[in-house]
Image (spheres, rainbow, N blue to C red):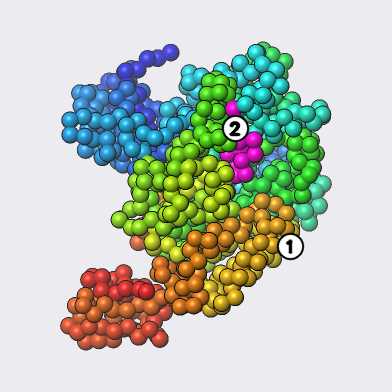
Amino acid sequence: MSDIAFKEKMEKLEHILEEHKNKQGALMPILHETQELFGYLPEEAQKRISEVTLVPTAEIYGVATFYSRFTLKPRGKYTIGVCLGTACYVKDAQSIMDRLKDELKIKPGDSTDDGKFTLEATRCLGCCGLAPVIMINEDVYGKLAADDIPGILKKYE
Amino acid sequence: MEMYRSHVMICRGTGCTSANSEQIAKNFEEEIKKHGLEKEVVVERTGCFGLCALGPIVIIYPEASFYSLVKPEDVEEIVKEHLVKGRVVKRLLYAESVEEDRIKSINEVDFYKKQVRVALRNCGIINPENIDEYIAFDGYKALAKVLTEMTPVQVIDTVKKSGLRGRGGAGFPTGMKWEFASKSHNEQKYVLCNADEGDPGAFMDRSVLEGDPHSVIEAMTIAGYAIGANQGYIYVRAEYPIAVKRLAIAISQAREYGLLGKGIMGTNFNFDLEVRLGAGAFVCGEETALIASIEGQRGMPRPRPPFPAVKGLFGKPTILNNVETYANICPIFLNGPEWFASMGTEKSKGTKVFALGGKINNTGLVEIPMGTTMREVIYEIGGGCPNGKKYKAAQTGGPSGGCIPASHLDVAIDYENLIALGSMMGSGGLIVMDEDNCMVDIARYFLDFTVDESCGKCTPCREGTKRMLEILERITEGKGEESDIEKLETLAKNIKNSALCGLGQTAPNPILSTLKYFRDEYEAHIRDKKCPAGVCQALLSYTVIDEKCKGCGICAKQCPVSCISGQPKTVYKINSDKCIKCGVCMTKCPFKAIEKK
């Protein structure tokens, strides 16, 4: 992210904070929207949230690291979530994960060097009828075999 | 209102949407226009029909023709034949509905025949993004009755009389919960909906929210009236984007119609709702943790009492029910509590939605009266295990539950019976496992889950589950010791008795229940260093079946560590000392001449 883009986003953060200022329990919605804006929760943003909401930064950091959807590291353009819920697990979701690791040459939790993909193991996505399943951003792909993976990744090139 | 001769219902639940059902809907609209039928035929995007295995699904009314596995390119034919000429396209119908001389309607096929849809009553029937359709199916009629004809006490009595119990896990009587909160005196109270469906393998809440969001909104408003609350929150998983979007649409439509907000239906009752997103923490399914999360804190549970009915969200009296529980509320007021109580068993009334998954033919959502047997669900509705494999166990209750082996398939499903078997109802995930699944590995899988999701607040759960996982990992890696089973049992007992919240207290269940029914598998891993199901990699070895090997040499060429030797046209051998158990040889062998044992 260039400095200018980052600055613009910090300005947008002010709108988010303004909107939630008087809400009870506003921290979670603020963090969700901040993450959507930046793609992650940058330190500067956490500090600014603290200044406006008067929640100590330590507590914000605590909340941000407690929940698995919040991330302090920038993410790839596309997040690939491999469902390792029970229904997918008993239908060999591990082989899907292994294939993605091979194709992208990264471990779960990491992003590719070009900033394109982030690979994650997720909990049940709730489409157990289609197991095994992966989700790329908001698109769900079901009834997969490991050999389907290269074709799917191609769509995002 | 427009009248149409035919309704084309297209599933836009998550399952079918991922299989391109939006494109199918668009093609229908285009083709219908092409044939000038837009005044006669309407296309509706609905919630889930349940039979996700055969998606995308299209149902055409009034015939109730059930088209399964529809592709966008099939649409032209369906419109031309079915909608223009009135000839059902047999080749695209759900195979079971086609008989020699007639076509079964969807209610006659095995998958639906035994189902009774109460919570799922509108799923697949209405367009969830259109409040008018919900109202046309008696929507908001229960709320009107409650607000204009009943006192809060009568509302609570009705729910109590129905015998409805919480559908989210423990099965606490819903009416009693409401009564506790109504008796707590405070000007500010809250109604919460737990839509943080975290149990792996459960997706009924998602389907209700995607297919019938107003039923939850209406029920929460009724609950607000009953306990004296004017604000509610729906805490929904961020992993469910379609559900979140439809809830937002439904809430704004309800506000527009004066069904949420100030002076609902011209009475002086005020109630409003807000959606709050979860952020991927399983422990937030526990009520006090969920409350902490809405308050903007880490989702950690706290000891009870005080119960949320006394001191809940922001310190005020609060009730919390899950999505399916709310989905049952309106029919109770429309049909009477006696009607609801007439279904089910002595202590478990009404119906329960199960999400069938894993090694079962008809994966999807089913709703059955309590008291139906497990066998009926798995074989008659679910169609049994695919590929002729042998049923081994069904897991219910997710990481808090246990498994039900073949010998107990005739048990009638209700809260008490499942607990007696060492499992639990839970939220209703039902994962079927066949002979190829290793039960020790399944226990390890669930413990891996709980260790990851333990919030770390209490020691029994934080440390205890980790120790249990280490033992299970050792066993699956072939390093198990004789005393391990005993150690697991002791740890399990202590954790159950001492953990702070439901997550920890139930974490040992998958181990205890697999030990109870599949102790021999544990013993085989520990004593014989064998995995009978052929799952645990460290305990397997790959061998060539001499009689089947044709000596083609493909395996030797594919082996990444060159541990397969032999000459063309002779039987090849695998050197198990060098073998890394990658399984490539087995997948590549054209004659299926390699086995793992």
Question: Mark 1 sits on what residue?
Answer: B459
Q: Amino acid at mark 1?
A: Thr
Q: Is residue B225 above or below residue B180?
A: above
Residue shown at 40% from the left, 86% from the top: B577
Secondary structure under tag 2 reads: loop
Residue shown at 20% from the left, 80% from the top: B551
Q: Is residue B172 magenta?
A: yes
**Residue B334 appears in which quarter of the rendering?**
top right
Q: Is residue A4 above or below residue B256?
A: below
Is residue A104 shown to the viewer in this render? no
Q: In this picture, which residue range is highlighted in magenta?
A: B162-173
Secondary structure under tag 1 reads: helix
Q: Between A32 and B209, which is closer to the camera in this rendering?
A: B209
Tell which circle, 2 or 1, labels the residue nearer the N-terminal end.
2
In the picture provided, is B597 more to the left or to the right than A114?
left
Is residue B410 shown to the viewer in this render? yes
Q: Between B288 and B26, which is closer to the camera in this rendering?
A: B288
Q: Between A8 and A44, which is closer to the camera in this rendering?
A: A44
In the picture provided, is B338 more to the left or to the right than B69?
right
**Residue B492 appears in which quarter of the rendering?**
bottom right
Q: Is residue B334 magenta?
A: no
Which chain does the residue under circle 1 lie in?
A: B
Give the percent coordinates (x, y) of residue A6. 65, 52
Residue shown at 52% from the left, 27% from the top: B342
Q: Amino acid at mark 2?
A: Leu
Quadrant location of the C terminus of chain B?
bottom left
**Residue B160 appears in which quarter of the rendering?**
top right
Question: Mark 2 sits on what residue?
Answer: B164
